[in-house]
């Protein structure tokens, strides 16, 4: 499976961006998926996770109430709506897929076996 993120760019603080993660090669509709990010000089961190059907989600405390993860299984695509962006949200954002079918969301990096190449989101102060 190939995961391709899009939608990143430069945005002002307080603004919004929607990231997309399009999967090809194999369906992702039966797998939990998630978003991670890596800021310069920092380790990659969990942002949000979603179960295989989209009925259950989980967020890092730092983004809770501002970000929304969703998925459109017929389109084999996952999204991350990012609102009220802060300068500290600046990072490369990665989408990822787990390997267990019909699974709940996961927040551990090691539980994801497939990763996109990342998309840069820069929030100007």
Image (spheres, rainbow, N blue to C red):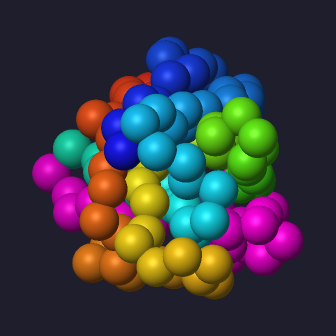
Report the residue at 84% width, 71% height from top: 55
Q: State the residue in front, 39 or 52.
A: 52
Q: Nearer the viewer, residue 113 or 43?
A: 113
Magenta-highlighted residues: 41-67
Q: Main secondary structure of the magenta part?
A: loop
Position of residue 97 measured from the top left corner of the image (x, y, whole percent): 44, 60
At x 49%, y 17%, the residue is 9
Task: Give the side of residue 31 with respect to residue 108, left or right.
Answer: right
Magenta stretch encompasses residue 50: yes
Q: Is residue 78 above or below residue 10?
A: below
Q: Is residue 110 magenta?
A: no
Looking at this view, name the residue that lies furthest to the front. 26
Furthest residue in direction right, as rendered = 55
Q: Position of residue 35 (x, y in %)?
A: 50, 55
| Residue at 28% over, 35% down | 117
Q: Is residue 109 above or below residue 75?
A: below
Hey, which quadrant is residue 122 in on the image?
Answer: top left
Residue closer to the observer: 20 or 65: 20
The count of marks equals 0
The answer to whether one can see residue 88 in this image is no
Location of residue 44 by image quarter: bottom left
From this view, report whether residue 96 is shown above or below residue 3.
Answer: below
x and y, in percent, of residue 18 in the image: 68, 31
Q: Residue furthest top?
A: 10
* The residue positioned farthest toward the left in the image shown: 41
In the rendered image, the vertical position of residue 63 relative to residue 25, given as above or below: below
Q: Position of residue 110 (x, y in %)?
A: 27, 78
Residue 110 visible? The answer is yes
- The structure residue drawn at horizontal position 67% and vertical position 72%, both measured from the top left corner, is 51
């Amino acid at each position: 499976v190939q995961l391709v993120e899009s939608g990143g760019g430069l945005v002002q603080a307080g603004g919004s961006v929607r990231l997309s993660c399009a999967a090809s090669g194999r369906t992702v509709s039966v797998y939990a998926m998630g978003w991670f990010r890596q800021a310069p000089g920092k380790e990659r961190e969990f942002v949000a996770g979603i179960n295989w059907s989209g009925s259950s989600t989980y967020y890092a405390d730092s983004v809770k109430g501002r970000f929304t993860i969703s998925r459109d299984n017929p389109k084999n695509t996952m999204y991350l709506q990012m609102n009220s962006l802060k300068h500290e949200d600046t990072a490369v954002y990665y989408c990822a897929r787990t390997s267990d079918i019909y699974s709940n969301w996961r927040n551990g990096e090691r539980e994801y076996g497939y990763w996109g190449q990342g998309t840069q989101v820069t929030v100007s102060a």
